[in-house]
Image (cartoon, grey):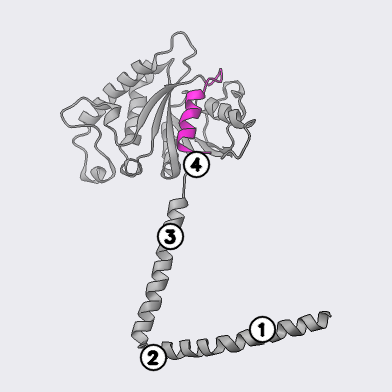
Amino acid sequence: MEVDRMEQLKNQILHWKNQIRPWLHQGEELIHQIPPTQLYAAIGAVLLTTFFLLLFRLFKRTKFNTIVLAGLSGSGKTVLFYQLRDGSSHQGTVTSMEPNEGTFVLHSEITKKGKIKPIHIVDVPGHSRLRPKLDEFLPRAAGVVFVVDALEFLPNCRAASEYLYDILTRVSFVKKKTPVLILCNKVDKVTAHTKEFIRKQLEKEIDKFRASRTAISDADVANEYTLGVPGEAFAFSQCHNKVTVAEASGLTGDISQLEQFIREYVKS
């Protein structure tokens, strides 16, 4: 019985082969009739179209899931990193000399049902000599969180403003329109400054930097975007990158506004 079935299948395949053969023969004759230059041009057009379609699909599917934590040393970036990762402050940690980097599901979302997209979080050291490391991560950032110490803000206002100015004026960063969250950390302390006060002071300082850098060299102009509107006082609302301000307390674990920003730009 099994032998009969195999014989029938074999005969069916031979039948199909005999039916297809004339079509293949006609196809070969048609190809030979086409001038070589036209044939090569047609093949090239098909290959080129296929390549661009694949490239388009790949580019369309590329969605960044990296969130960069930047800011001055001591602002509390590393505490926030650990709160996001495992819900602990690690006793305040110490000043980071190397980036803290990890890909994980946010601690607050571990118990949620369904598929949760992991976030790639990078905590870039705030020391001035180590800031160039920021260049490694900004190109693939879905969002940048600029952490400000709300408790010791005034003594560090100028330095924080200059660092933020340098980020917001990078041509490549502006072209990508990467969103920025200015996160006022340590607001649990009674003497901490409010986010509105911090926002206004940062805007005033950045306005001063903008005015003082009008005589930069041509080489710098190529790599630096001019902030604000000429003749008007600077405001974050004038930036091409969306800039928002929020509050947090890394030590107490009050980071809901930070998590909201992350999930706005890295969807589950």
Q: Earlier in the sequence, mark 1 or mark 3?
A: 1
Tell me if residue 152 comes above or below residue 22 in the rendering: above
- Check disc 1 and report the residue beneath it: 13
Say which residue label 2 marks: 33
Q: Closer to the N terminus: mark 3 or mark 4?
A: 3
Q: What kind of residue is marked 1?
A: Ile
Residue 105 quadrant = top right
* Residue at the extreme left: 231
- Which residue is tagged 4? 65
The nearer-to-camera label among 1 and 3 is 1
Mark 1 or mark 4, whichever is nearer to me: 1
Q: Earlier in the sequence, mark 1 or mark 4?
A: 1
Mark 4 nearby-residue class (10 Å; few <14, some 14–19, many ≥20): many
Which range is magenta?
250-268
Looking at this view, is 124 or 129 the one in front? Answer: 124
Query: In this image, 80 relative to 72: left or right?
Result: right
Label 3 amino acid?
Leu
Q: Cα distance, mark 4 to mark 2?
A: 53 Å
Asked whether 104 falls inside the magenta stretch, the response is no
The residue at which mark 3 appears reads as: 55
Q: At which x and y percent is residue 20?
A: 56, 85
Left or right of 28 on screen, residue 235: left
In contact (CB < 8 Å): disc 2 and disc 1 = no
Q: Which circle's residue, 3 or 2, is located before the other in the chain?
A: 2
Give the Cα separation between the discs numbered 3 and 2.
33 Å
Residue type at numbered disc 4: Asn
